[in-house]
Amino acid sequence: MRVAGVFHNLAFLLVGLVIFQPALLAALQWPEGKKIAISLSYDDALSSQLDNAVPALNQRGLKASFYIVPLSDAFKNRIQQWRQLAQQGHELGNHSLFHACHSGKPGREWVQPWNALDDRMVQAMVNEITLANTLLTSLDGKSTRTFTPPCFDQMAKDGNYVEAVKAQFIAVKSLEDPSFAALIAPNKISSAEIIEFIENQPVNIKLINVLFHGVGGDHLITTTEEHAKFLDYLLANKDKYWVDTYRNIMLAKKQQSQ
């Protein structure tokens, strides 16, 4: 993934990379000649996503990926709505069962001792993520899925757990080639700042990941108004942008690379 210049209050993330031949990247074509694919994703299975993000997406006919943490109260208490979301064409992505992250990094005071990735073994994470896949398949019937590592952390106590699970997925968000994809994780910023990030990418970028958390509530919040303005921007520029689930975008990429 490519990281661009820093805007105020933006979270930009760069982690492990995979290689995709430059010639294939240059030849990659999206449906209807769209120049850039936009993956809208929503992490952590939050009530504000069901209450605010999903209606806004459905009203505009846009599809997105929702990365589920089954431990979330919003997931446990509203399972039927997550199943319905998948039936509407959105993706249920894997975000692990418990959202384990490194506890020692700045701003990680919220990580509980029992859920610190620093102390988890690779096999424990493999088991957790495999079980999360099984649970999600029971909801949506899908055998092809994508994964977003919580906090984009990869290293368990005894090794890289993302490397150990990546074969279960069509794609892992954070393993894209930086000459192919860029990512922005909005947090209390305006739609204009998100749009500025998108419009200032180099011409070689084929995919932009826009990774939300709370929409009008919960945590890492984007307001409903700014979220709606951004979705309206995507509609107004649908000649340039292919907005779809991360699964569908990466399936299209894989098909062209074969």
Image (spheres, helix red, strand yellow):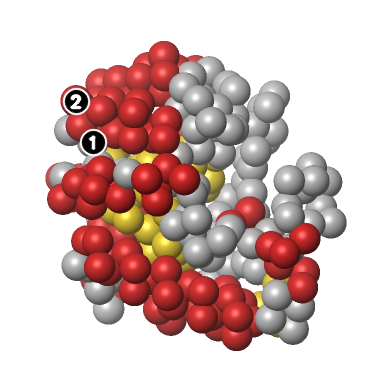
Q: Label 2: state its secondary structure.
A: helix
- Residue 155 located left or right of residue 206: right
Please determine whether, in this image, residue 112 is positioned above or below residue 18. Answer: above
Residue on which the image places disc 1: 62
Q: Residues within 10 Å of mark 2 (few under 14, many from 20)?
A: few
Image quadrant where one finds the C terminus:
bottom left
Measured as percent of width and height from the top left, residue 109 is found at 80, 46
Residue 239: give x, y in percent of width and height.
22, 32
Q: Find the residue positioned furthest to the front.
A: 77
> The disc labelled 1 sits on which kind of residue?
Leu
Residue 219, position as x, y percentages in the image: 58, 33
Residue drawn at point x = 34 percent, y = 35 percent:
50
Q: At 29% across and 33% down in the image, what residue appears? A: 54
The residue identified by callout 2 is 59
SS label for mark 1: loop
User: In the visual, does 245 lie left or right of 163?
Assistant: left
